[in-house]
Structures are given as structure tokens and as C-alpha cells.
Amino acid sequence: MPKFQQASPGRVLFTLLASIVFAAGLVFPGMAFSDDSAITHTKDSAELEWGACPPFMPEGCAIAVLQGNPAEPNADVFFKLAANSTVSAHTHTSVERMVLVSGELEVEYEGQSAEVLTPGNYAYGPAGLPHSATCRPGADCVLFIAFEEPVDAMPAD
């Protein structure tokens, strides 16, 4: 697995979100948009509605939909994991394209060495490949995830 490249977290997040918004003509809930308007959205924005994670995920886990419908293809979410907590091995129907926004997250895909993500790091997760993650002590982890297929998570066998 290639090593992760460090980038400015704010720049990476803005570029990803702006590209999605401008390319698709999407608007975040509660925000006005026109061709000559700038748009921003952060993990702490009041517009975010944090919902529960699947039952097998640890306490303190939450998901906020940034755009799209999680039951349909091409949804983007923030995934929050409390500091010092672990998500057990699980899989997704969809590939995941991820950028860590805050915290420090150790991710391990089946058959590969664990990697530690720091803010601004990008990771790609293939569909169906079991993986686990631990948010290290110090700060909650917030991960931007772009899904190609409907959002789901199932415990690995």
C-alpha cells in the first residue's frame, strides 16, 4: 500500500467539497447558492444533522450526510468516531474515498499493514474488503467519505 501524502487539511477539504458542489450543482441544506457565491461547510457547522451509526459501531459514533441520499448512489458523509474508540472489522458494498478531517485514525485492511491517517491524508477502500479502524486518544476523528453506491456497513464474518 502506498504511503499517504500530507496536505493542508483545510485545503483538501475545501477542494473536495467545492469540486463536488460546483460539478454537481449541489447545495448543502440551509445554504443559499448562486454562481457568484462562495460556499463553505465544516465538521462543526450548525447545519449538520448527526445521526446514529449502525448498532455494531462504538458509542460516540455519528454520521452526517453532506450531500445526496445515503440510500442512493453517490452520497458524501462525515463519519465521526470518538477518541480512543475502535470500529470492528466491517465491509461496505461501495468503494470509499476518504480524507481525514480531524483526529488521528489507524486503519487496517485485511491482508495489509495498518496505516495511520492524520488530517489531510487520503485513503481509498475497495468495496467488500474487510477493515477496522481505531481513533487514537486526544481528539475525535472526523472522516470525509464519498461513496459510489448506497451507504452501508456490515460486520465482517
Image: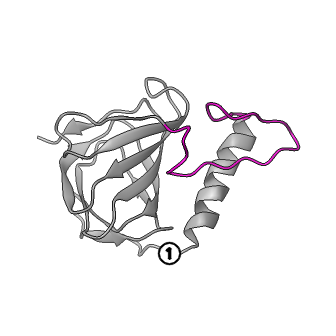
32 relative position to 85: left or right: right
Whether residue 43 appears in magenta in the rendering, the answer is yes
Principal secondary structure, stretch drawn in magenta: loop
Q: Residue furthest right?
A: 36
Seen in the image, is 20 located left or right of residue 73? Answer: right
Residue drawn at (86%, 39%) of the image: 35
The quarter of the image holding the N terminus is bottom left
Magenta segment boundaries in residue numbering: 25-48
Where residue 37 appears, as percent x and y from the top left, is 83, 44
Q: Where is residue 90 in the image (x, y as percent from the top left)?
A: 21, 44
Q: Nearer the viewer, residue 148 or 66?
A: 66
In the orientation shown, which residue stands out farthest toward the left?
Answer: 157
Classed neighbour count for the residue bearing mark 1: other residues with Cα under 10 Å, few (<14), some (14–19), many (≥20): few
- Where is mark 1, residue-wise? 5
Q: Residue at x 27, y 48 (%)?
A: 129
**Amino acid beneath label 1:** Gln
As drawn, 9 above or below 29: below
Which quarter of the image is occupied by the C terminus?
A: top left
Q: In which quarter of the image is residue 116?
A: bottom left
